[in-house]
Image (cartoon, coloured by chain):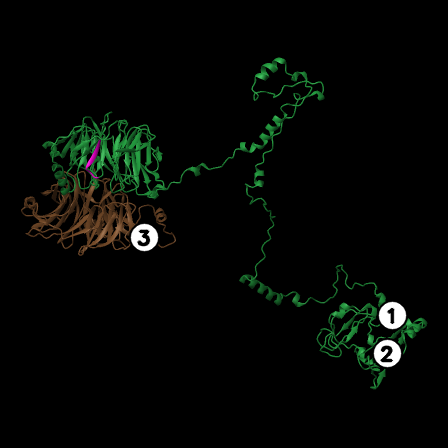
Chain colours: A brown, B green
Amino acid sequence: SVPQNLAKELMKPKVWDHKYVEFDFLINGQFLRMPLVTHMEMENISTEEVVEIEYVEKYMAPQPEECIFHDDWISSVQATEEWILTGCYDQTARIWSLEGKSIMTIAGHTEVVKDVAWVKQDSLSCLLLSASMDQTVLLWEWNVEKNKVKALHCCRGHAGSVDSIAVDCTRTKFCSGSWDKMLKIWSAVPTDEEDEMEEAANRPRKKQKTEQLGLTRTPLATLSGHTEAVSSVLWSDTEEICSASWDHTIKLWDAETGDLKSTLTGNKVFNSVSYSPLCRRLASGSTDRHIRLWDPRSKDGSLVLLSLTSHTGWVTSVKWSPTHEHQLISGSLDNIVKLWDTRSCKAPLYDLAAHEDKVLCVDWTEAGLLLSGGADNKLYCYRYPATASDVGA
Amino acid sequence: PVGLASDPSWSHPRCPDDPLHLWGSVIALPASAIPVHPSPALCCPGCRQRVCLDRGMDITQLSYPFPPFLPPPRHPGVHLLETVSPALTPLPSAPLQDIRNTVGNIPMEWYQDFPHIGYNLEGKKIYKPIRNKDELDMFLEKMENPDYWRTVQDKMTGADIKLTDEQVDLVHRLQKGQFGDVHFNPYEPAVDFFTHEVMIHPVTNRPADKRSFIPSLIEKEKVSKLVHAIKMGWIKPRKPKDDTPTYYDLWAHEDPNSILGRHKMHVPAPKMKLPGHEESYNPPPEYLLSEEEVRGAWEQQEPAERKLNFVPQQYRCLRAVPAYSRFIHERFERCLDLYLCPRQRKMRVNVDPEDLIPKLPKPRDLQPFPTTQALVYRGHTSLVRCLSISPSGQWLVSGSDDCTVRFWEVCTARCMKTLPVGGVVKSVAWNPNPTICLVAICVDQSVLLVNPCLGDKLLYGATDQLLESYAAPEEERVQPVQWVTATIEEHSKGVRLVVQHSKAVKQVTWHGKGDYFASVVSDNSNMQVLIHQTSKRWSQNPFRKSKGLVQCVLFHPIRPYFFVATQRYVRVYNLLKQELTKKLMTNCKWVSSMAIHPGGDNIICGSYDSKLAWFDLDLSTRPYQLLRHHKKALRSVAFHKHYPLFASGSDDGTVIVCHGMVYNDLLQNPLLVPVKVLKGHAMTLDLGVLDVLFHPTQPWVFSSGADGTVRLYT
């Protein structure tokens, strides 16, 4: 009986060896999305030449994980490995666990919160930022254990709605862009003393506010040069700031000296910009249907490398993958979040059509979590599995 | 003794005395010298030797070089005069000459003065024969000597020689041009050695040369040289001959206005009608008119209507026919017809109708302009009548029939504030001054001044302070309206001041500086238009008389002008001089709306009869162009502040965006090109778009519709 059992064991099909795997094919670096003949015709590839075919394991569709309900429109989102921070039009910022549990509601702004950012995360306390239409940026300290939040600093100086903030990689500074056409650089290090303000006239009123919202902080530097509202800022390097504006330009600034380094000129209002250190490209979303990729180092400003077109409305938000040099995510006013691979610029990899209203913000964490929030008060989370073997032969 | 020089080369015959001398050309000797020198001679120009030729000799042969060792052509009559001897036989060779005188062939005149005439072979002098005959002796001898005619003198010896009969015959024959030899027959029958007919046997049986059947190297070399030359382009092949005959249009360059050109327009003279029986002096009786016909019909008719311009009459004979009274008149008419004919000629010009349409640039060259709908601002529950935008372009305000005013964030379509006002909102206007945050809203009989508290905190705080800093004047002034400060409840909603009119207000508009605003009241009196000053809370009525139903009013963006649109006219008033400057005729039945170009020199008017009139104020008081693009009544028109764009919204639910470029050059007309029809609004209650508005900085256009939405097109 023993040999029989052994034979049975051997006869069993080894399913784990023959896992069904789907592949995607790349012809000269472009995804094959149609019959080979039409693709060759479209791309003007001669049939006489040797064509380089690459194949990769097909990227799996993002798996929906959570749907987090808010009370109002979600203006911004930023997630870490443990928590999700969202800014909301009900004048609060909220912290959620990855499972969708509400951990903390941070109230303090008197207007819509337009952008949020993490500064530092510890197991004990975290530093985070929220920018609002009430022209201030608040630096909060969140005590994780006690689950208490405290406004450390109130950054005043903007004369318009603060639409975008970005923390630099040393986590000691941050930059804010506002409707008043200015970029301001602030210190992100909490201190005990209040910064000196110029005017002493209405001191009592200010005292009153600082009691509630922490110490007033003034900017380290102000970068002016845009002629219209600044819609998006980011640090593309340790000492380089990139800002997108309604004046149809993306400007690169030296954060140390405050000088304008270069200008990329488009022909539409820019809503959002994102930088990938992996491929060193800027992706911009503007008030037309296109996502455009730029080389920030090119000197002749107006060079668009590629445009990704599939949305039917304004692209409100773009975000590069932090782990993959070809992939990015975009949200648009046409209620759809799209996952793109730059090697397939005609069609996105996946459409994430869960939102019922305008998508206002997207985020992509290093752990492979895709987040999108919109005007339907919902924050959707997707798990994007990284394929085992990234690139085939 | 002519020994032709033994020159080995075949060249000219050489002089026997001096081989370096060549014989010269053939010279003709005078015919009178025939007895002595009867024929042409060859003369050596160097030593003056002469060869006389017999006439029978073929001179053409002599003029060619002939081989030196051959004897001269063996023509029978060639004699050399020096060798004239009694024997008269041709000398077989030169050494056998009879040389009695050794002086040679020299002119004998040289010895004229000597007693001798030369030297003989022994070297003795040859003495001239004694010639003592005088003229008489000569004459006598001529008379008596029967041989005198045949006696010649030998120049070399001076002796008289009597020619023999043979010699005389020879001279005679030569004179006649015959051959010297009697027996020579020049007319012997010709024998053809080679017949012209092709024979079956070859003339010679020699086999063909090798070179006749191998390709010739020389020819090959020549051909290759030619080929090379053709290749190098040194030789051009001959142009192929053009076989087509060439004609010349003699009249191609003729001036059509010249006299000849006018002949082209020749019109043949119309032929006159030939006379018929009526014109006859004795017409058949059926052609004659009766008395009644003459009286009744013919005389009553107009001369132009008459079938005949005369009355046919019968005469006894041709002689009895009187002179035709209308002859000169008719001839004059005929001449007039002929020479005025060209005036009647119609000159037809062939013009392609396409050429008459002005060339407009393509719309895509005129970008940017709004093309697609980007955002929909939803929230109103009834038709949205009016729109206005903050000077920064961040906020939009809309007034609706659902008795609310809503404030929107432009870039996200988020409704930031809703202000219930308790009445239908007819018009809203955001203060154009960027340092003042104030919105004027027309509700029923009042104008509300609302601080929306949006944007910069400092700004809207300063606006409140500005309004609160008003100090009422000491003496009360009579005003057409009442200025009321808002109640606390209203104040919390944002309302700061209420300007209460006596009747319903239908429009409000701000002056560019943001202190004055004008309101239009639905009224028939002179109280229709009021101008208010916010800082002093003071209102005035600028017009004494009503000029018609005022539709809308407008402040000039730069100069102190005020535009008042009534149903058919737009009146331009100068506010400083307080007088009427211009009156624009709109050519429309009912003006609905009006907008002014930011430059201030151009105005567009929309009308309910679906026309849009563009006025160039510098050009004329009539429309520069009337655009009829909409199918239904226009409700609203708008200009962009920076881009050369204007838009019109209509009851047909569309917004039409046009490119309206105004040039600084006064001589260049504005360029108006319709670029885009924007659709999106649903038709509700037969109404479509109620208001259009441009974004202050971007090429975007907002439209509000009867379906309760506001739409943004980018």
Q: Position of residue B259 (x, y in %)?
A: 57, 40
User: Would you place residue B307 above or below residue B688 in this image?
Assistant: above
Asked whether, in this view, residue B103 is left or right of residue A33, the answer is right
Local secondary structure at mark 2: loop
Going by the numbered disc 3, the residue's amino acid type is Asn
Going by the numbered disc 1, the residue's amino acid type is Leu
Q: Nearer the viewer, residue B371 or B221?
A: B371
| Few, some or many residues within 10 Å of mark 3 (<14, 14–19, 20+) | some
Circle 1 sits on which residue? B170
Chain under numbered label 2: B
Circle 2 sits on which residue? B158
Q: Position of residue B352 (x, y in %)?
A: 46, 37
Asked whether, in this view, residue A205 is left or right of residue B394, the answer is left
Query: Which residue is located at x 90 percent, y 71 percent?
Result: B149
Q: Residue furthest top?
A: B292
Report how far apart the C-alphas of labels 2 and 3 lie in the structure: 127 Å
Q: Quadrant of the C terminus of chain A?
A: bottom left
Report how far apart the C-alphas of labels 3 and 1 lie in the structure: 118 Å
Camera-nearest label, 3 or 1: 1
Query: What segment carries the magenta color?
Result: B513-519
Mark identifier at residue A28: 3
* Quarter of the rendering containing residue B492: top left
Does the CB distance between marks 2 and 3 fall below 8 Å?
Answer: no
Query: Which residue is located at x 22 percent, y 49 percent?
Result: A226
Going by the numbered disc 2, the residue's amino acid type is Gly
